[in-house]
Image (spheres, rainbow, N blue to C red):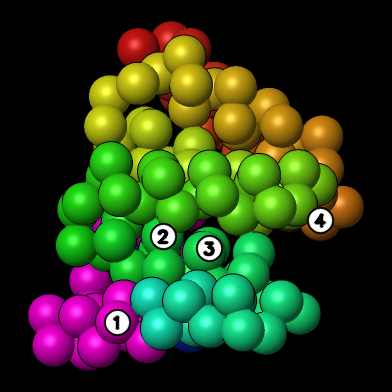
Amino acid sequence: MLFRKKCSNCGAKNPKDVTACAGCGAPFELKQMAVQKTIKNYGEVLHEKTVHPNLMDTDACNTRGNRYLEQRQLGRAIEEFGEAIRLDPKYAVAYGNRAMAYKLQGNKIRAIADFEKFIALTPDPRLIQIAKQQVEELATK
């Protein structure tokens, strides 16, 4: 995995596809116009599902959730991640993203539950370690 995002808050290097720093949890931001365009595009993709049922719905929901998360629209982000999970209950990334949204929302219990589900589903030992650190941090607050 390539590291492309450097956190301006703590300086940690992060994978290019994350929406928040793995080190400190600070969200990465996109320019407002780009975010709005992405949300609209993914909305159109989801709308097309009725016409083309084989579209990658889970990825579309997850990406749209990430865009809402970047805008700090936590409720909408949680809904999108939840929809991705409903469509594919073994989609680890959506659990990890929803856990971050719950953490930012201050919902420790749900954040911990989603991080634990993410840990159970993901095969990447590095990501498992990061998620375990998040659980430990949440449990000690």
Name the residue beneath numbered marker 2: 65
Which comes before the other along the chain, label 4 or label 1?
Answer: 1
Between disc 3 and disc 4, the foreground one is 3
Q: Which mark is residue 127?
A: none
Secondary structure state at the residue bearing disc 2: helix
Picture quarter with the N terminus: bottom right
Tell me the CA gap for discs 3 and 1: 14 Å
Q: Earlier in the sequence, mark 2 or mark 1?
A: 1
What amino acid does circle 3 point to? Asn
* Residue 21 on the magenta segment: yes
Q: Which residue is mark 3?
A: 62
The residue lying at 19 percent from left, 62 percent from top is 71
Mark toward the start of the polypeptide (4 vs 2): 2
Tag count: 4
Q: For the residues marked 4 and 1, what is the alpha-carbon distance in whole angstroms?
A: 32 Å
**How far across and down, in percent of the image, does residue 3 sit?**
55, 80
Which residue is identified by label 4?
Answer: 124
Q: Amino acid at mark 4?
A: Asp
Compare residues 127 and 46 and report the one nearer the observer.
46
User: What residue is shown at x 82% (from left), y 34% (from top)?
Assistant: 120
Kind of element beneath mark 4:
loop
The label number, if any, that marks residue 40 in the structure image: 1
Q: Contact, CB < 8 Å: mark 2 with mark 3?
A: yes
Q: Quadrant of the C terminus?
A: top left
Q: Secondary structure at mark 1?
A: helix
Q: Type of residue at label 2?
A: Gly
Front in this rendered view, residue 37 or 103: 37
Residue bounds of the magenta highlight: 18-42
The kind of secondary structure element at disc 3 is helix
Mark 2 touching mark 1, by CB under 8 A?
Answer: no
